[in-house]
């Protein structure tokens, strides 16, 4: 790996050294804005290799139409600090909870084979995003798992008695709270775990790089902020807090799970290679 690729992306020589060679730099305006906000939180810009991985993610999701569907999203890898990792790609910044005992710096791994924020069974994020009622049949939720959980829900909201979430995520399985059904029974694979609803009759879930469809009708719900690393309850008390390691999450409108999977997998792989 070249020395230039290890420099902060905004360093004078990040693009290479005169007479020796050059390397790409971020060009997407939204990616540069995100990287600038991350640098403020981190106290320094990330390495050029990380920055160009982020830039490619922005460009790829825009080209595929995925970017506009992201309403709340964080890349929980690459940033130098936990504060930097919690800078949102879009939407508001998540709240690290519980206030007195949430995630700490030691829970965060920025690169390597299993980057991400490691759940501890007590800490979770309030995404700050609640689905509007109009999006009952136009929504998605995703997490990118690098270490599978043994307990808890990856993300979601709703009431355990059946009046609640359209879809949640549990033990690397999609969970339909209204029927207490898991889709599918898969607790071993990692990567993107996501669900997408584009109509009232069924939703698509993705695991192990493949889509499957559940013919489960949507229902009206109480619209609460989505939690990550847990499920937000109608009582405003989270439950089923997970110990998974998650390197990315997104919440928003319907999108192509295949395109999202490709973009996020490439992002996390490229960050690992850069670090």
Image: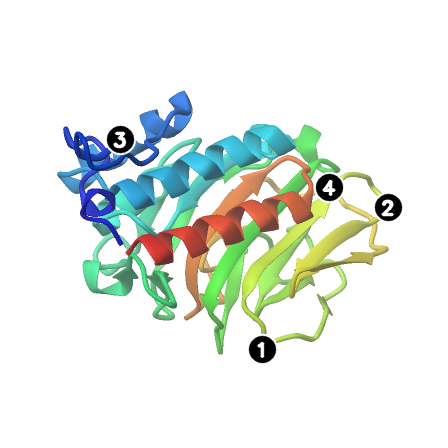
Q: Earlier in the sequence, mark 3 or mark 1?
A: 3
Residue plotted at (83% across, 41% down): 200
Question: Mark 3, residues whose alpha carbon is within 10 Å: few (<14), some, or many (≥20)?
Answer: some
Q: Is mark 3 on a helix, strand or loop?
A: helix
Q: Distance between the residues labelled 1 and 2?
A: 29 Å
Which mark, by number, is residue 220? 4
Question: Disc 1 versus disc 4: distance between alpha carbons?
Answer: 32 Å
The numbered mark, 1 or 4, whose residue comes first in the sequence reads 1
Pair 2/3: label in front: 3
Q: Which of marks 1 and 2 is nearer the N terminus?
A: 1
Return the mark for residue 37. Answer: 3
Locate the C terminus by quadrant: bottom left
Q: Quadrant of residue 131?
A: top right
Q: Where is residue 6 in the image (x, y as percent from the top left)?
A: 21, 47
Foreground residue among 61 and 11: 11
The local secondary structure at tag 4 comes to loop
Q: In which quarter of the image is residue 87?
A: top left
| Of the pair 124 and 71, the residue shown nearer to us | 71
Q: How crowded is mark 4: few (under 14 residues within 10 Å), some or many (20 or more)?
A: few
Q: What element carries label 2?
A: loop
Q: Is residue 48 shown left or right of residue 58? A: left
**Helix or strand or loop: what does disc 1 sit on?**
loop
Number of other residues with Cα within 10 Å of mark 1, as a class: few under 14, some 14 to 19, many 20 or more = few
Q: How crowded is mark 2: few (under 14 residues within 10 Å), some or many (20 or more)?
A: few
Spatial CA distance of label 3 from label 1 is 35 Å
Above or below, 80 relative to 64? below
Residue positioned 67% across, 48% down in the render: 258
Q: Which of marks 2 and 4 is nearer the N terminus?
A: 2
> Residue 39, percent across and down?
21, 35
Give the labeled residue for mark 2.
Answer: 201
Assign the N terminus to one quadrant of the image: bottom left
């Amino acid at each position: 790996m070249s020395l230039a690729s290890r420099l902060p992306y905004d360093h004078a020589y990040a693009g290479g050294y005169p007479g020796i060679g050059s390397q790409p730099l971020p060009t997407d305006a939204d990616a540069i804005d995100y990287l600038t906000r991350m640098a403020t939180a981190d106290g320094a810009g990330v390495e050029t290799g990380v920055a160009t991985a982020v830039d490619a993610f922005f460009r790829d999701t825009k080209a595929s139409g995925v970017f506009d569907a992201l309403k709340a999203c964080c890349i929980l890898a690459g940033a130098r600090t936990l504060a930097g990792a919690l800078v949102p790609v879009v939407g508001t910044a998540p709240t690290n909870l519980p206030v007195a005992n949430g995630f700490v710096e030691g829970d965060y791994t920025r690169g390597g084979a299993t980057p991400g924020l490691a759940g501890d069974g007590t800490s979770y994020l309030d995404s700050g995003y609640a689905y509007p009622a109009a999006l009952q049949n136009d929504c998605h939720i995703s997490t990118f798992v690098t270490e599978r959980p043994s307990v808890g829900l990856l993300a979601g909201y709703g009431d355990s008695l059946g009046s609640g979430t359209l879809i949640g995520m549990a033990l690397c399985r999609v969970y339909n709270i209204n029927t207490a059904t898991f889709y599918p029974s898969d607790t071993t694979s990692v990567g993107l775990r996501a669900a997408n609803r584009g109509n009232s009759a069924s939703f698509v879930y993705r695991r192990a790089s493949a889509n499957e469809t559940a013919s489960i009708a949507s229902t009206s719900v109480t619209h609460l902020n989505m939690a990550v690393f847990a499920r937000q309850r109608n009582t405003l008390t989270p439950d089923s807090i997970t110990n998974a390691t998650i390197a990315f999450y997104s919440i928003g409108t319907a999108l192509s799970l295949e395109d999202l999977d490709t973009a996020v997998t490439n992002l996390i792989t490229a960050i690992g290679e850069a670090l």
